Image: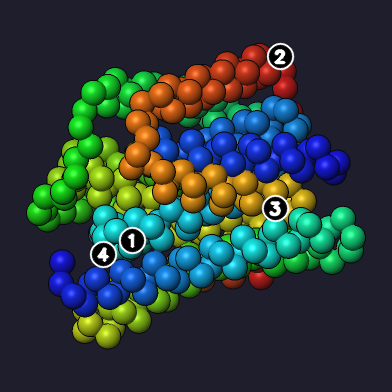
């Protein structure tokens, strides 16, 4: 690989990690399509590399959230029983699914994420940040576990964190405060992604020469993002991410219609 | 949140940090050394393996914490998660 490609990968990782930490969404979502569309990687390899980026974001940022006592470690551990099971099964199945089907699923997920981010941006227009965490007891564990199994499955199949599934379920049905739900989801993502990453790594779907610069960028970006996030309004970054995600969704659709991803 | 939980959170956070920074240092060193020696890519690979191992390590740490607090229920839950992760490791990396 050329030096320019290495630097470009570091930059992509930096942006994915930084935007992800600032906007409170997984940055991995922009890595897979970039690798698949512009670097011409097969979907399985793009997903394998993204899983490592996802672990990097989760590890880097959750150390800060755990330190601030926002993460509910017990709730996270319980739901991880389901996310890791889902991730393991999905990673084993993913190999049997052809590239084009994976690309179609991923494009759908990109559209879904754009819409859910638009909703998130709309809701956060001029809301004050909630500072103190109210007392709570997580409820409705069966539903939480079912949603986690599904989120883990998406993670193993598409290399994403599954936050868009877990956070709303924890918030709406398990009655967990939103900040705790987001931090706990982020905490779980590392273990979930690692579970499926072992399978992808074993199959040789993780290219070290491309994963290393990306991971270096993601680390730097997400650490910086998590540190400055209390001082930055996430609204504009969210808008930027909506733009990028929407653009990538259209690009993937275009490439699919043109017969790509074979 | 009681004092024990605060201490447990600190140890957990330290584990994550140690893993993250070790992985980061190895990956960066590997990328820089790649220009001068073929070992660079091996060092970067070691960094990625540390990154892969960190989530599993933090389950072990949490599990030990729960046992020390005599919180049997969550100690067993952590053991369960660890079991699934080890299964994935055996199915993936070992084969």
Query: SS for tag 3?
Result: helix
Dot 1 falls on a residue whose secondary structure is helix
Residue A45 spot, x, y in % from top left: 69, 44
Quadrant containing the N terminus of chain A is top right
**The C terminus of chain A sits in image quarter:** top right
The chain holding disc 2 is A
Q: Specify the quadrant of the image occupied by residue A198.
A: bottom right
Q: Earlier in the sequence, mark 3 or mark 4?
A: 4
Can marks 4 and 1 be said to lie on one chain? yes
First reached walking from the N terminus: tag 3 or tag 1: 1
Give the foreground label among 2 and 1: 1
Horizontal relation, residue A161 to residue A74: left or right: right
Name the residue that disc number 4 marks: A74
Residue under label 2, please give it.
Answer: A258
Which-is-in-front pick, marks 3 and 4?
A: 3
Distance from disc 3 to disc 2, alpha carbons, whole Å, reads 31 Å
What x and y, as percent, mark residue A48? 63, 48
Query: Residue A212 has which mark?
Result: 3
Secondary structure under the numbered disc 2 in the rendered image: loop
For residue A171, what is the image quadrant? Answer: top left
Q: Earlier in the sequence, mark 3 or mark 2?
A: 3
For the point 23% across and 37% down, the residue is: A129
Chain letter of the residue carrying label 4: A
Rendered residue at 72%/22% (across/down)? A260
Cα separation between marks 3 and 1: 26 Å
- Disc 3: which chain? A
* SS category of the residue bearing label 4: helix
Give the residue at mark 1: A66
């Amino acid at each position: 690989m050329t030096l320019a490609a290495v630097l470009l990968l570091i930059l992509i990782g930096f942006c994915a990690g930084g935007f992800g930490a600032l906007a409170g969404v997984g940055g991995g979502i922009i890595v897979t399509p970039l690798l698949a569309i512009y670097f011409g990687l097969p979907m399985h390899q793009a997903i394998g590399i993204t899983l490592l980026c996802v672990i990097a974001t989760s590890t880097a940022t959750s150390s800060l959230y755990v330190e601030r006592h926002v993460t509910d470690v017990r709730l996270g551990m319980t739901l991880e029983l389901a996310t890791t099971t889902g991730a393991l099964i999905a990673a084993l199945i993913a190999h049997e699914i052809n590239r084009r089907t994976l690309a179609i699923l991923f494009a759908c997920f990109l559209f879904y994420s754009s819409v859910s981010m638009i909703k998130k941006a709309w809701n956060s227009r001029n809301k004050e940040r909630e500072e103190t965490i109210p007392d709570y007891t997580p409820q409705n564990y069966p539903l939480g576990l079912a949603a986690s199994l599904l989120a883990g499955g998406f993670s193993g199949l598409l290399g994403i964190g599954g936050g868009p599934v877990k956070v709303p379920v924890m918030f709406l049905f398990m009655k967990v405060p939103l900040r705790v739900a987001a931090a706990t989801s982020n905490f779980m993502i590392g273990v979930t992604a690692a579970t499926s990453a072992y399978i992808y790594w074993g199959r040789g779907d993780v290219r070290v020469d491309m994963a290393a610069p990306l991971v270096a960028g993601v680390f730097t970006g997400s650490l910086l993002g998590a540190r400055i996030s209390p001082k930055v309004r996430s609204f504009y970054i969210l808008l930027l991410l909506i733009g990028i995600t929407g653009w990538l969704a259209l690009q993937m659709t275009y490439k699919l219609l043109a017969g790509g991803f074979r | 949140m009681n004092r024990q939980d605060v201490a447990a959170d600190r140890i957990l956070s330290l584990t994550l940090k140690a893993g993250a920074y070790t992985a980061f240092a190895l990956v960066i060193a590997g990328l820089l050394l790649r220009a001068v020696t073929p070992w660079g890519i091996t060092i970067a690979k070691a960094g990625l393996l540390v990154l892969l191992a960190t989530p599993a390590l933090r389950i072990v740490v949490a599990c030990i914490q729960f046992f020390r607090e005599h919180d049997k229920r969550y100690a067993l839950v952590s053991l369960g998660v660890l079991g699934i992760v080890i299964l994935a490791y055996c199915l993936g990396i070992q084969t």
